[in-house]
């Protein structure tokens, strides 16, 4: 959902998205909120390291350049793809999975698994899945509650798996089996236990590189359960196979990049997932017999993969351990694997005695998106590493397109067109289906839906702004092709009107974009001078308005409205972002609270050191091991030592700050300099915050992301959630068992506030005097006062406002002389009278030539 690229006072914002095709609105990404960055750019890094012999590594990948994001702003959505995106891209039902149990097998414990899952599901409006309501169950590899030791890395894998299963099959029960460690024997035992406890779908997002001759003999039986969909990740290191995906009894899952594309018939494009040196595993297993259902001829053994799904840029919520920074982007074939396991669950219980990994091959392409571009490396047999029509190694037969390829048994095809009953025009983005099997209409209103043989009840068509079609019952035979069209009646509409204003002091009207969540219709824009808008919505329903200012520096806002028979007024006040501090007409004010630990004999004034019973030592300031300052600071510093006597073997100690008053702050940020050596399995370092004088603490920095040494490192932690609090304490908490050390220096808690500067806005267009066409790239400056100019921009999303739009802040009230210039045109100066906290209109017709 793009915005006009307004260059206001030299500051730009993202450009408009392309307008929808004339044939109808293109399918839209429903989960995206204006202002949210939903495109992954940085290469991800593996969550788990290289396993030792006889062990497996998890295949989760995460973006490493993300700041902590434990709390979202009101109109903010998590970075990355959400449940609606996945269901829309793969034509999956919105509320499926009821009556099914999906098992996830992972190593080690994630103590926050259930709590984090609750946050993820609540964020996206998914039904609660808890131990209390019977939806969620966590067991050890023996089926009990003697959970294994926690592990920071596998905790991230567990969070990813739980969130992906929830996204695709929100009504399914989830069984989390945590094995003692990442040994292949323990993980295999976990799979057996999952099946023993009744799961018909088992997701395994881990592996060990290579195909060994004795894999089948030692572990194969644990992954051989006819009537159960055993699903395994193919790996993240590009071309090459990995166990257990090599086994002929499992569904081996590859990965794709999934990208919203309004110009695609489905609204999405997919290519082979590839980020830097990472990509899905694939190839030919040397020691595994080729299953009968595989017909590719370039590999005499088992070919990997079978199918694939998204492996990049999915939203995950995880708070445990050093990687637990809240909302993050995850990926890898670890993301694709639970997506496929959940898709099997949506398709229904596998037939006893069958191997579900054969189902996609029997579908003969039906119910699959064939991925035809991209590669995961180089190889002698091209299709095993390069995507193309039909079967290929990196993506297998393709990604889900409904459920037809993931169920056993014969099926037929239903096609047709959905049109407006009054105009006859095609309705794009309509949903056709029975609730379980669904399809989305293309730009021309057509759809294709695969259905199981027999009668299917309740087939209907629904679309935004239309009454649902009367449900029909259709019977279909194996291989049969049926046609059924739907004509939808447009619903009566009511006006929703209002004014969008600045809500942080100026109160001036704002030029803003208003989109209706879940609607494929084009957004509306407010009047740049009055801030007024008017849109018509179908009656007798509730809606969420996503409101985003065109001026940079304002935070997006969501507004709930209920539309009945009468027009509705829905005003909105947008607040400036004190962290970005780019809003025109506001002066950023920052107040630091700094501590440099200058004394070597005691904690600074107001700071305390607390040491838990049984801890051998606590924080010190005299550099007891003579390491010198490794933080990047100078002079004395705070340090906790754990790696040499008499300081080992156990520490549990906290360095606690005085209480800071942030009651007048709009935001806050913590920075500190640090140096450390750490072993993640033996040493935990966190920064926590408290608003109740230390009675309860909440982690704001989860510690280092990898073991080893870091020095001269400056850490920045957003603390916006603590703005407005009258008492905020910080705690540097260190827990270790004969580990290493942690140094801290130059701690600074900075409060941030934006104060309005007297002045007003001038808006208008710069146009060609002869043609009336807007001039993009012109500059408007205030010659009677200092300050940068404003550049004009195009406004393709707003038909009411022509191209060449500018917005200029002028300090002070009264008469100002504004001057517009553009290449190839004579400059023009005009007088404008501005007023504090108001918007003045002034346009400039420029004459060609100089």
Image (cartoon, rainbow, N blue to C red):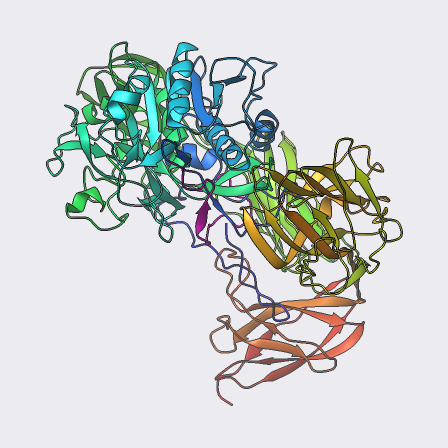
Is residue 578 visible in the rendered image? The answer is: no
State the image coordinates of residue 843 (x, y, percent, origin top left): 61, 72
Residue 301 appears left or right of 18 = left
State the image coordinates of residue 507 (x, y, percent, origin top left): 77, 55
Q: Residue furthest right?
A: 605
Q: Quadrant of residue 761?
A: bottom right
Q: Is residue 39 magenta?
A: yes
State the image coordinates of residue 544 (x, y, percent, origin top left): 60, 37
- Give me the residue at 50% from left, 57% from top: 799
Q: Is residue 399 magenta?
A: no
| Depth order, front residue of 216/60 | 216
Report the number of numbered marks: 0
Q: Is residue 30 above or below residue 552?
A: above
| Depth order, front residue of 27/211 | 211
Q: Quadrant of residue 326?
A: top right
- Give me the residue at 62% from left, 67% from top: 8
Instruction: Report the span colored magenta.
Output: 28-52
Is residue 40 visible in the rendered image? The answer is: yes
| Depth order, front residue of 334/54 | 54
| Depth order, front residue of 68/300 | 300
């Amino acid at each position: 959902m793009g915005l006009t690229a307004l260059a206001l006072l030299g500051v730009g914002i993202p450009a408009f998205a392309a307008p929808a095709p004339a044939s109808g609105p293109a399918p839209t990404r429903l989960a995206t909120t204006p202002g949210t960055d939903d495109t992954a750019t940085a290469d991800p890094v593996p969550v788990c390291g290289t396993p030792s012999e006889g062990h497996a590594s998890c295949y989760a990948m995460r973006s490493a350049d993300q700041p902590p994001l434990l709390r979202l702003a009101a109109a903010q959505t998590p970075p990355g793809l959400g449940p609606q995106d996945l269901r829309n891209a793969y034509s999956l039902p919105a509320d499926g999975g009821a009556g099914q149990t999906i098992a996830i097998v992972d190593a080690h414990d994630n103590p926050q698994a259930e709590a984090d899952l609750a946050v993820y599901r609540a964020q996206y409006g998914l039904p609660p899945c808890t131990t209390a309501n019977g939806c969620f169950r966590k067991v050890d590899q023996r089926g009990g509650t003697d959970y294994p030791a926690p592990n920071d890395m596998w905790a991230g894998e567990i969070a990813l798996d739980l969130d992906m299963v929830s996204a695709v099959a929100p009504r399914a029960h989830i069984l989390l089996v945590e094995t003692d460690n990442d040994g292949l024997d323990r993980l295999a035992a976990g799979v057996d236990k999952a099946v023993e406890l009744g799961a018909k779908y088992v997701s395994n997002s881990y592996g060990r590189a290579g195909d060994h001759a004795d894999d089948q003999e030692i572990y194969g039986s644990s992954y051989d359960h006819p009537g159960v969909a055993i699903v395994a990740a193919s790996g993240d290191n590009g071309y090459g196979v990995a166990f257990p995906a090599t086994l002929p009894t499992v569904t081996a899952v590859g990965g794709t990049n999934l990208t919203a594309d309004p110009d695609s018939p489905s609204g999405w494009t997919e290519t082979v997932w590839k980020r830097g040196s990472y990509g899905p595993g694939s190839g030919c297993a040397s020691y595994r017999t080729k299953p009968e259902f595989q017909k590719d001829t370039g590999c005499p053994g088992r070919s990997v993969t079978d199918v694939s799904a998204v492996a990049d840029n999915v939203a995950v919520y995880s708070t445990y351990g050093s990687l637990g920074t809240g909302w993050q982007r995850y990926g890898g074939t670890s993301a694709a694997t639970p997506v496929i396991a959940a898709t099997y669950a949506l398709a229904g219980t596998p037939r006893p005695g069958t191997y579900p990994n054969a189902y996609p091959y029997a579908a003969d392409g039906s119910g699959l998106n064939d991925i035809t571009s991209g590669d995961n490396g180089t190889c002698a047999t091209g299709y095993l590493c390069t995507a193309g029509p039909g079967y290929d190694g990196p993506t297998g037969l393709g990604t889900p397109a409904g459920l037809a390829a993931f169920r056993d048994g014969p099926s037929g095809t239903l096609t047709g067109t959905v049109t407006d009953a009054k105009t006859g025009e095609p309705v794009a983005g309509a949903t056709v289906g029975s609730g379980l099997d669904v399809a989305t209409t293309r730009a021309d209103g057509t759809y294709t839906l695969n259905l199981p043989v027999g009668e299917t009840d309740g087939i209907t068509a629904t679309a935004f702004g239309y009454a649902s079609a009367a449900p029909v019952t259709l019977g279909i035979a194996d291989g049969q092709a049926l046609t059924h069209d739907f004509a939808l009646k447009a619903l009566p509409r009511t006006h929703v009107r209002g004014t969008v204003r600045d809500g942080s002091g100026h109160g001036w009207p704002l030029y803003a974009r208003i989109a209706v969540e879940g609607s494929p219709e084009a957004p509306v824009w407010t009047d740049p001078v009055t801030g007024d808008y008017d849109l018509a919505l179908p009656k007798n329903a509730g809606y969420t308005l996503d409101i985003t200012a065109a001026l940079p520096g304002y935070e997006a806002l969501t507004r709930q409205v209920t539309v009945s028979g009468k027009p509705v007024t829905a005003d909105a006040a947008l607040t400036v972002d004190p962290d970005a501090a780019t809003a025109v007409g506001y002066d950023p004010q920052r107040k630091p609270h700094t501590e440099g630990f200058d004394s070597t004999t005691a904690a600074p004034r107001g700071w305390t050191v607390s040491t838990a019973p049984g801890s051998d030592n606590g924080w010190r300031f005299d550099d007891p091991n003579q390491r010198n300052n490794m933080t990047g600071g100078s002079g004395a510093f705070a340090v906790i030592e754990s790696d040499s006597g008499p300081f080992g073997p156990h520490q549990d100690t906290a360095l606690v700050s005085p209480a800071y008053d942030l009651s007048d702050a709009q935001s806050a940020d913590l920075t500190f300099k640090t140096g450390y050596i750490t072993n993640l399995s033996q040493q935990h370092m966190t920064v926590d915050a408290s608003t109740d004088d230390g009675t309860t603490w909440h982690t704001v920095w989860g510690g280092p992301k990898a073991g080893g040494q870091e020095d001269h490192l400056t850490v920045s932690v957003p603390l916006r959630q603590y703005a407005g609090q009258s008492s905020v304490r910080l705690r540097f908490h260190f827990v270790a068992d004969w580990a290493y050390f942690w140094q801290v220096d130059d701690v600074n808690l900075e409060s941030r506030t934006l104060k309005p500067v007297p002045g007003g806005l001038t808006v208008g267009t710069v146009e060609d005097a002869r043609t009336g066409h807007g001039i993009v790239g012109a500059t408007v400056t205030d010659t009677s006062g200092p300050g940068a100019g404003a550049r004009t921009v195009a406004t393709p999303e707003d038909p009411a406002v022509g191209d060449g739009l500018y917005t200029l802040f002028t300090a002070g009230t009264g008469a100002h002389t504004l001057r517009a210039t553009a290449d190839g045109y004579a400059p023009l100066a005009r007088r404008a009278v501005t007023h504090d906290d108001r918007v003045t209109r002034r346009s400039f017709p420029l004459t060609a030539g100089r």
